[in-house]
Image (cartoon, grey):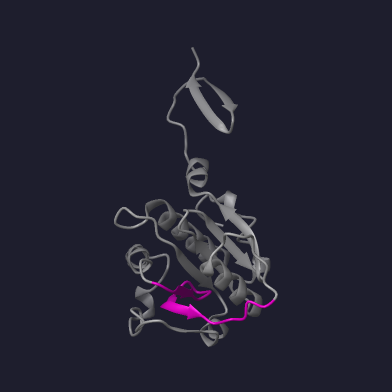
Amino acid sequence: MEGNLDILRDICTEKRGIDCEILEAVVVLAIEIAREGREGRKIGSLFIVGDVEEVLRHSKELILDPLAGHPDELKKVTSHDMRETVKELAQLDGAFIVSNEGIVVSACRFIDASAEGIRLPLGLGSRHMAAASITKCTRAVGVVVSETSIVRIFDDGELISEILPELYIFSRYSLHLSGPYSESTQNQVRVVSKAE
């Protein structure tokens, strides 16, 4: 896996049947949306990755698809321009469908899959139910950005991972202190100080 994102290794495994680098790119994009929001407000979003034909069969457009008709080479989830486009479109309702090749195939999709047999913790909303239900009836993986700024990942109808974006960002933080330093942790707060 590229990008030194070892923290995502347990989520982005080959057993999911999804290209690990593509799933990683979608998860990182979801983390960015959770952290940044848009126009100063928190927004939620839903990404369905893989098994595109089946996912499209179990979904429909909510509005005219803003990505329809654009060439695939412009719709790669790894492209900076596409990532910024997705962040803007995330303010609209509906899911993004991402192929295993990393193409954002469609946006603003209503997921129409049965929720029968799906059990979620109380308090999780319709995006979470949509992710659980579509991953239960397809081979896709769902990535949900909650309006509470938590990223949740679903596979086979189950919640498999929760990411707190601020902690994720800190995991990638490298120290700028030079020389020896001391480290202490209390109540899950880590303090690193230059040794005297």
Left or right of residue 105: residue 136: right
**Whether residue 4 is situated above or below residue 186 in the rendered picture:** below
Q: Which stretch appears magenta?
A: 93-116
- Quarter of the figure with residue 140: bottom right
* Image location of residue 190, percent across then percent down: 54, 30
Nearest the eye: 29 or 100: 29
Q: Residue at x 56, y 62 (%)?
A: 124
The answer to whether residue 31 is above or below residue 111 is above
Residue at the (50%, 74%) spot, across then down: 101
Q: Is residue 183 above or below residue 14?
A: above
- Which image quadrant is residue 53 in? bottom right
Looking at this view, name the residue that lies furthest to the bottom: 57
Image coordinates for residue 180, horizontal then vertical, percent: 51, 20
- Outermost residue toward the front in this view: 122
Residue 165 location in percent, x, y?
49, 49
Q: Quadrant of residue 155?
A: bottom right
Residue 34 sits inside the magenta stretch: no
Question: Which percent across, then down, holds residue 74?
Answer: 34, 74
Drawn side of residue 48 relative to residue 176, left or right: right
Q: Quadrant of the N terminus?
A: bottom right
Residue furthest toward the top?
196
Residue at x 64% of width, y 72% of height: 17
Is residue 102 covered in magenta? yes
Residue drawn at 51 percent across, 46 percent down? 168
Q: Is residue 144 left or right of residue 157?
A: left
